[in-house]
Amino acid sequence: MRFKHISFILLPLFFLLSCQSEEATIENPTAKGGKRYGGTFKFMSVEKIRSLYPIFSGDVYTMRVISQLFDPLLTIDPKTGKACPAIAESFKVNDDATVYTFKIRKGVKFHEDPCFKGKTKEVTAHDVKFSLEIACSALNKNKVYFLLGSRIEGVDSFHEKSKNTIPKSGVSGIQVLDDYTIQIRLKNSFSGFEKVLTHTSLGITSREAYKMYGKAIGKHPVGTGPFSLKSFDKDAIVLKRNPYYWRKDDLGNQLPFLSEVVMKYAKNKRSALLAFGKADIDIALELPIEEIDHILGSFKDAQNGKNIVHKVVSEKSMSTMYVALANQSEEFKDRRVRRAFNMAINREEIIDLDLQGEGWAVANGFLPEMEGYPKGDVIGHQHNLEEARALMAQAGYPDGENFPTVDFYVNSIKGSTGHKTCMAIARQIKKNLNVNLNIVLCTIEERERAIVSGKAKIWRSGWIADYPSPENFLTLFYSKHLNDNASTVNAFKFKNTEYDSIFERALLENDSDQRMSLFAQCDQLIIDEGAVIPVLTNDHIVMINARVRDFQVSSMESLNLTNVYIKENK
């Protein structure tokens, strides 16, 4: 079989790599290039983190911590959007993109842990096989089965046997060729598979740790990342520097620079911003724009010593905030009702009046902008009251008559941007369709339980790209991901044979332009069916203490602290 070899020679600063076979000790805090070792980076989360095991995570708040603890096979170069080396130093793909062969980097070590008798252990292809197989399992908490389950040969039979334990037989399509070589055989051609393997939840894990900690594995993460777990309690998560980390920067400095990373909890975004103003944390994420000047004042104030010296960094977010509909529920099984709800909402008005200009109204489909995707070809729902009311009447609900009051689950804090957005949506639906939506404020966990139980018929949600591909968004509507426990992937219970057919053709298409065109057709079909209510996208804006250096903001709203260092302001 002929292979195309993909090698990596020139890499940007962020991804320049090397191995470290012995423990690195930092006696001198000064590093090359004026950088420094030591210091603690502090940030906050507005959502509670329950588990730090990769496959059990499904929200951006947890991912931001997990990405410090685990490395996947490949990672995304933020400048090019292409897959680059991580645990795998190189890979080969056969001509029809059905066989991927990965060469595992030598010298990569797991964190020190009791599961290795207090020592470390080198990562091998056997660890990679275990990590991919557990992501293919039917374990109750596994949130990422959709990433690999429909793609790799032999997953179906493995999945059926893996509800409680991981079968020793493994997945037939994942084969260890030698200690540093692993091969993955796909059911069908899929030239974008390497991007899937950059997903944070596919970080390489240890079989020994899983065997030792069992159900408590979420509190005992053992990975290869730049930081390892120091403590995990109800108030905070503290990470410490991994002295065995395998990366160096382009100046030869052993990474990471930071000694510790501390994540605490905030009641809401405003309280996190207040903490930033007091220098209690180093970065404010998901900024409440309307509060910034009120709490921190201007940049000129900072220069004059009236507040913390800081900088604001912005990147177009590869995300979508939407209102989800249970497509098979009694309330929303009629396509006309779903389309009417979409047309009854004036997105521009919500942003201009309710959000004070924060965000961008979705006008073209469900997907955000991304490289190569013809977003402009997709025609989104326009605000059209006459058409919306006519559709409701055709569906048997003239002027909202006989349509029940529906609980609207909103995972947000009272008065937050999310709450304001959903209040505006409920208000418009009442005014324009005479339908009552009863807002139920809840946590992500409470919302997920309501979705799984079938209690939730309409809810607020959002999706941030795990990797830069339309497929990552469109897979949410693929009917082969339908299952009774879905709270993330196809929680809409959307089932459409035409959509599935086009989506599958796109996955098999090796020509990039043709593949993107097919993805756009899928996007259009989602809109035409009213399967979901896309509302807005946001810029990803973060505020950073000026003492923090070499921080890179990501369009996928991730948090990578590998190259970050602290240089105190004078």
Image (cartoon, rainbow, N blue to C red):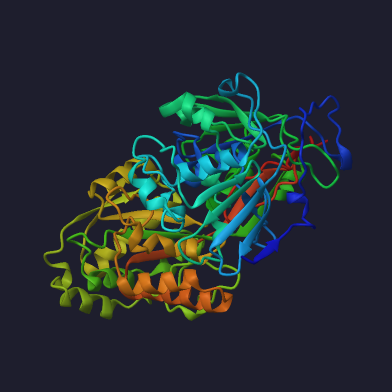
Q: Is residue 7 visible?
A: yes
- What is the quadrant of the C terminus in the image? top right
Seen from this angle, which residue lies furthest front? 1
Q: Total marks drawn?
A: 0
How far across and how far down the image is residue 369, in percent? 55, 68
Which quadrant holds residue 26? top right
Q: Is residue 426 above or below residue 334?
A: above
**Residue 449 position within the rendered picture, expressed as x and y whole percent measured from the top left:** 30, 43
**Along the line of sight, the residue nearer the viewer: 330 or 268:** 330
Let me know if residue 317 appears in the view.
Answer: no
Vertical relation: 96 (above or below) 459: below
Residue 279 in picture, x, y percent from top left: 66, 34
Residue 8 horizontal side relative to residue 265, left or right: right
Q: Is residue 546 left or right of residue 497?
A: right
Closer to us: 495 or 508: 508
* Quarter of the figure that contains the N terminus: bottom right
**Image: 198 above or below 545:** below
- The residue nearer to you, when weighing 236 against 352, is 236
Snapshot quadrant of residue 20: top right
> Measured from the top left, where is residue 201 in percent x and y?
51, 45
* Residue shown at the point (32%, 67%) measured from the top left: 531
Please name whichever residue, 120 or 339, is drawn nearer the observer in this view of the structure.
Answer: 120
Q: Kindly identify the residue that appears in the image at 40 percent across and 76 percent down.
A: 524
51 to the left or right of 66: left
